[in-house]
Amino acid sequence: MKLVKFYSDGELSPIKVSSTEETVAEVQNLFFEEQLAEEQIILEIYSKNNGQTSEVDELRLDFDRIYSRKQLNKKVLLSGYKLVDSSVYQNDFSIQTILGIKNEQRYLNASFKGYMLLIPRGTNIGGAEPMLFASLKNENFYLLNKERSLSPESKFKSILSWIKGISFKMFSK
């Protein structure tokens, strides 16, 4: 028996099963499939990219979340960030990020590959969750954790703090 989601006039259809054990087994199977999909995403994120790109129809993606390598390099030039392979990150990603990737892959009927991170330069990678990108064709990247953004204000603030740091050093000498 296979449980199928079926909606009729906004109501759930009655599901007939032959036994309680069969129902429990089917529910456990559904949960196992969901957990397996999430674990495959996590495994892909923490694995080295090896130049893989996602096979996805870019026209179906949210245009505001697609960045070219050139755009990312311009945005992070003075902001103190760098684009690296996601395998260097050793902290956990939020549940919202993993579930968001899983839902988006289902919606697009695709599998994201070649995960990259935008992280602060230096040795300390910890702190807030970094911006996570999937590699697309033609040196494009898709921002996966959409709650994060590459806003111009953050770059401007970084430049101002950099200038303040330089001026403080000059005046202190």
Image: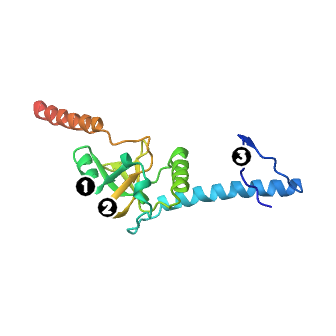
- Helix, strand or loop status at disc 3: strand
Image quarter (top left, top right, bottom left or bottom right) of the N terminus = bottom right
- Helix, strand or loop status at disc 2: helix
- Helix, strand or loop status at disc 1: helix
Measured from the top left, where is residue 149 in percent x and y? 37, 41
Tell me if label 1 and label 3 are in contact, CB under 8 Å. Answer: no
Tell me if label 2 and label 3 are in contact, CB under 8 Å. Answer: no
- Viewer-proximal residue among 44 and 53: 53
Q: Is residue 107 above or below residue 78?
A: below
| CA distance separating discs 1 and 3 | 46 Å
- Viewer-proximal residue among 123 and 89: 89
Disc 2 packing (10 Å; few <14; some 14–19; many ≥20): few
Q: Amino acid at mark 3?
A: Tyr
* Residue ranking furthest to the front: 9
Measured from the top left, where is residue 163 in percent x and y? 17, 35
Q: Amino acid at mark 2?
A: Glu
Number of numbered discs overlaid on the protein picture: 3
- Viewer-proximal residue among 151 and 170: 151
Query: Would you name the residue on which mark 3 appears?
Result: 7
* Among the two numbered marks 2 and 3 on one chain, the one whose residue lies closer to the N terminus: 3
Q: Which mark is residue 58?
A: none
Q: Between label 2 and label 3, give the one nearer the viewer.
A: 3
Q: Between label 1 and label 3, give the one nearer the viewer.
A: 3
Query: Would you name the residue on which mark 1 appears?
Result: 70
| CA distance separating discs 2 and 3 | 42 Å
Tell me if label 2 and label 1 are in contact, CB under 8 Å. Answer: yes
Query: Would you name the residue on which mark 2 appears?
Result: 139
Judge from the rendering whether residue 67 lies leftward or rightward of residue 93; answer left or right.
Answer: left
Q: Is residue 115 above or below residue 126?
A: below
Residue occupying the point 37% across, 68% down: 51
Disc 3 packing (10 Å; few <14; some 14–19; many ≥20): few
